[in-house]
Image (cartoon, rainbow, N blue to C red):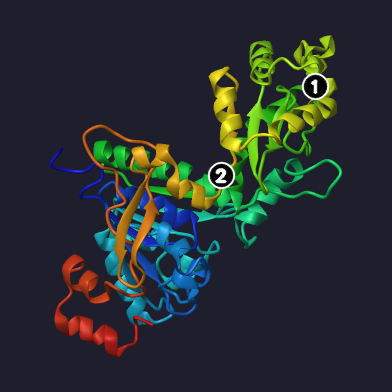
Amino acid sequence: MPDTLPFEGIKVADFSWVAVGPTTTKYLADHGATAVRVEANTPLDILRAAGPFKDGVPGPDRTQFFADYNTSKYGITLDLKNPAGVEVARRLIAWADVFIESFTPGTVDRMGIGYETARSINPSIIMASTCLMGQTGPAAGFAGFGFHAGAIAGYHEITGWPDLPPDGPWTAYTDTLSPRFIAATIMAALDHRRRTGEGQYIDASQLEMGLQYLAPQLIDYGVSGRQATRMGNRSDAMAPHGAFPCQGEDQWCAIAVENDQQWAGLRKAMGEPDWAKDERFDGLAGRLAHQDEIESKLSEWTMTKPPRAVMDTLILEGVPAGVVQRSSDLQEDPQLAHRGFFRNLDHLEMGTIPYPGHQFRISGYDSGPRSAAPVLGQHNEEVLRDLLGMTDEEIVEVVIAEAFG
C-alpha cells in the first residue's frame, strides 16, 4: 500500500450545498483530501430535511441522502450573514487549496468571499462556482435545481412515452452529471497549479455540462435536422429494446438486441418459436418496423420466467440483458458484494450504515469512503483549532458572536 493517497495534502473548503458541489468534493475527500463542509443552521441544507431517515424518524442528522454525498469530510456550521462568520470563512479560504460554492451568482461577492477576495488572501486558490446556467449571461440569475436544468437542457422532452406528456429522468439529472465534470476540471487545475503555481477560477454551468450527455441527439439534429423526442424504452438503432415483464409482481428484465447475431441468440434462448422465424424480423429495419408485434410475443415468453432466469438465459446466448433491480436487491447483489461496493461506516447519530463506494478500483489503495458524514456542526471547534490554528480565546469569541449559527 502507498504511504499517501492521491489527494492527500490537498485542502478543500466546501461552501456548496445539496448535491453537485458536495458530490464533487466527496470525490476528493474519499481519495485523501482534507475537506471541510461548511453549512448553515438556518436554512438547513435541503438534503438534511429529505429522506430516507434512519428508522423512519426525521431529523437533520438522520438522513442518508445527505450522508451519501458528504463522506470523509469535516463538518462545520457558519452564519455567513454574521461578520464573525465571514471572518472564519476567509480564514478557511486562506487555508484551502480548493474553494467551491454553489450560491446564486453574485451571492458570494455580496458576502465578501467572492473570487477577487479569495484570490487576494490566497493567490493560488482554485475556486469553483457551480449553478444552473453559469455565472454570466441573461439567464445567470435563474435559480432552481437539477430538475430545472435537466428540463432546459432537453432531457424531459426525450424521456417518456410518445403518447404522454414529458416525463423526465427520475432524479435531478444534471445534479448527477455535473460533479463528474467539475471534479475532473478541479484535478486539471490542481495539476496546472503544481506545474505553474497559478490558481484558477472555474465557472461551471450545469446546463452546459448536461448537454454533453445529449451529444448524439445534438449532432443528429445539426447534421440531419431530425429532432429527438420521446420513444419510451425504444431505440432507433436496436430492436427489441426495452424492459419486459417477468414472472412475479412488478418484476422486469431489460433486453437489448443490437444486431442479427443477437437476434439469433434471442430466438435460440426462447426455443426457436415459430413467430420469431418470420422473415420480416431478419434485419434491423424489419424489427424496427414491427416492434409492437415483437414486444408482445417476447413479453409472453418473459412472463413465464423469473427476471434473473431471463437474464441468465439470454446472457448465455450473447444477448444483453439485465434484471431491473430495487435498492433492496442491490444490497444483496453478489457482484457488488464481491467488489466490496458497499462500505459499513459508523455515523454519530445513525450508527452503522452502508455507504456506496466508487464505480472503479485502482490498484494499490482503497478509494474510500473513509468516514461517515458529519452531523451538523460536528467539527466546529476541531476545524478552527486544529486546521485553522485559532486559539481558544479566538474560538470563544466566535461562539460569543454566535457565528456558528
Q: Residue at x 38, y 54 (%)?
A: 355
Residue 221, above or below 106? above
The image position of residue 167, as x and y in percent, is 74, 50
The image position of residue 236, as x and y in percent, is 75, 25
Residue 254 can be seen in this image:
yes
The residue lying toward the viewer, choosing from 226 and 199, is: 226
Calculate the distance from the C-alpha at mark 2 to the C-alpha at mark 1.
27 Å
Mark in the foreground, 2 or 1 = 2
Secondary structure of the residue carrying tag 1 is helix
**In the visual, does 102 lie left or right of 219?**
left
The image position of residue 8, as x and y in percent, is 21, 48
The residue lying toward the viewer, choosing from 200 and 347, is: 347
Q: Which residue is mark 1?
A: 288
Looking at marks 2 and 1 on the same chain, the residue that comes earlier in the sequence is marked by 1
Secondary structure of the residue carrying tag 2 is loop
Q: Looking at the rendered structure, which numbered label has been put on residue 184?
A: none
The residue lying toward the viewer, choosing from 362 and 260, is: 260
Q: Which residue is mark 2?
A: 325
